[in-house]
Image (cartoon, rainbow, N blue to C red):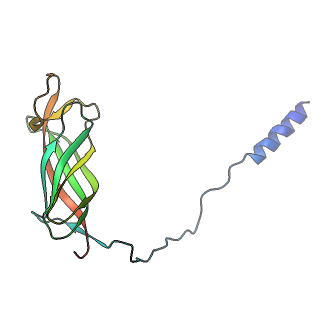
Amino acid sequence: MKTVLVIALLLTALSASADKTTRKNLKVRCIEPTEATVAADTVTLSPGMVALSGYDKPLRSNKESLYVTNATRRHLLYVEIEITYFDESGRQLHKRTAKQNVDIPAGETRQLTFPSWDKQRNMYYTLSGKPRTSNGTPYTVKAVAGKACYREGR
């Protein structure tokens, strides 16, 4: 009886062995652009190309928002915003880069909303207004647009 059980277990183990899923000699295929593909140009921004304003993050909010103005003559498709967070004494609390796909025509402004860095939701931006409860921690920000991707042409 034990030998039958051992043989059954061995057969089960052989049939349940994992396949080798690592593929070797894979080659990257480049896809030629077609008419439907939008050509884009990535740019390190000069001052004045993209303006940031109106940052907001109230206490208990899990989202941050700000306004992005495209001050160029080209359609803005993507922007990277480096945000540095400071406490009231000027000490750095956190620094991150928010990467956003956008759709901002030339000369227009759009509001961007993205997940907050404040996972515990106990911080608030000083210009968002003082919360009703006094147990929140105020902070300030410095936001700079770093890279952008524009649609080629007009």
Residue 66 percent across, percent down from the top left = 17, 48
Q: How many marks?
A: 0
Closer-to-camera residue (35/125):
35
Quadrant in the rendering for residue 8: top right
Q: Residue visible at 12% across and 38% down?
A: 91
Quadrant in the rendering for residue 132: top left
Closer-to-camera residue (75/64):
75
Closer-to-camera residue (111/130):
111
Say left or right for 91 vs 2: left
Quadrant housing the C terminus: bottom left
Residue 113 percent across, percent down from the top left = 25, 46
Quadrant in the rendering for residue 93: top left
Say left or right for 20 vs 83: right
Q: Residue visible at 29% across and 34% down?
A: 119
Residue 61 percent across, percent down from the top left = 24, 34
Quadrant housing the N terminus: top right
- The image shows residue 53, relative to residue 70, as above or below, that is above
Say left or right for 126 vs 122: left
- The image shows residue 95, relative to residue 151, as above or below, that is above
Residue 36 percent across, percent down from the top left = 39, 73
